[in-house]
Amino acid sequence: MKHRQPLRVAILEAERILADAGVASPRVDAELLAAHVLGVERTKLPLVPLVDPPVIDAIGRLVAERAKRVPLQHLTGWVAIGGITLVVGPGVFVPRPETELLLAWGLAAVEGVPAPTVVDLCAGSGALALAIAHARRDAVVHAVELDPAALAWARRNADHRAGAGDPPIHLHAGDVADPTLLADLDGRVDLVLCNPPYVPTGTPVPPEVGDHDPETAVFAGPDGLDVIRHVVACSARLLRPGGALAIEHDDSHADSVPALLATRRVLTEIEDHTDLAGRPRYTTARRRT
């Protein structure tokens, strides 16, 4: 009979394997995979000193996949944002931690606005829309996504959050390049949030992105602005006077996205913001009153 083994040793071995494979956060990923196998929170791992051999084997199988640069979230099946958990997998963009900053800005922008109307463009998994609905139960939230596979993930997440007691959101299959998109909301929207495709085509990206995220959710033309140009036009049309807009962008867009917004005379208070690493990450604006 095989004896129970120290979990700490398994995590150290997993960390070594992941570090050798070039994974950016080997210790964190090793602990999250172990916690996933054990069905506990990562912070509870120290309370599990010894584990059975099948647990070690299960951790080892997941670590081997992660070492092939399969995204961590594809292996665990979930990602957390804004206090909620979403299911993700092949066919949908995995939300990144820096998008929490966009979410926080958006929530602050509609603080004190009763029953705000919010639109999430290029919604992907529905992360921003569902996080807004969770935090602001009085909000009327619309999410727009073009890709059918991503929209299916968004529907799954929307059904799950509604089942957990969050207010339902309105999901739309639509294209930000369509000048009639959400035309019934023209001039009535309090907040537009968007995490669009924005990486310039040809930019080197990690294998987790290049091999697993949908290409159309990542790349957006030679300058990375093909989708954002349409987002700016759409947002200027949807926002009410005083309404707010926030668009996530590539770290090469600190000047170009604010310049795009400045071409719309109805937009003002244009400001670029950095992420926690100090890189340019999103631009905000308001519609003139």
Image: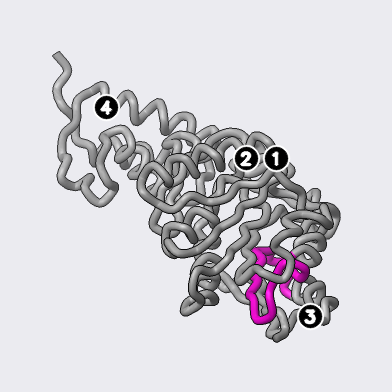
Three-letter amino acid code of the residue under disc 2: Leu
Query: In this image, 36 relative to 104: left or right?
Result: left
User: On the image, numbered disc 4 is attached to which residue?
Assistant: 55
Indicate the quadrant containing the N terminus: top left, top right, bottom left or bottom right.
top left
User: On the image, numbered disc 1 is attached to which residue?
Assistant: 147
Q: Give the CA separation, mark 2 to mark 3.
A: 31 Å
Q: Residue at x 26, y 22 (%)?
A: 54
Where disc 2 sits, the SS reads helix
Q: Is residue 155 above or below residue 134?
A: above
Viewer-nearest of labels 4 and 3? 3
User: On the image, numbered disc 2 is attached to which residue?
Assistant: 151
| Residue interval drawn in magenta | 235-254
Q: Give the CA separation, mark 1 to mark 4.
A: 38 Å
Q: Callout 1: few (<14), some (14-19), or many (20+) C-alpha neighbours within 10 Å?
A: some
Q: Residue at x 63, y 44 (%)?
A: 209
Q: Nearer the viewer, residue 237 or 202?
A: 237
- Badge 2 or badge 3: first in the primary sequence: 2
- Badge 4 or badge 3: first in the primary sequence: 4
Where disc 1 sits, the SS reads loop
Q: Residue at x 75, y 61 (%)?
A: 231
Query: Is residue 159 at least partly visible in the picture?
Result: yes
Q: Give the CA separation, mark 2 to mark 4.
A: 35 Å
Q: Is residue 250 magenta?
A: yes
Q: Locate residue 179, reporting x and y percent.
A: 83, 57
Q: Give the CA separation, mark 4 to mark 3.
A: 58 Å
Q: Locate residue 153, reporting x and y percent.
A: 56, 38
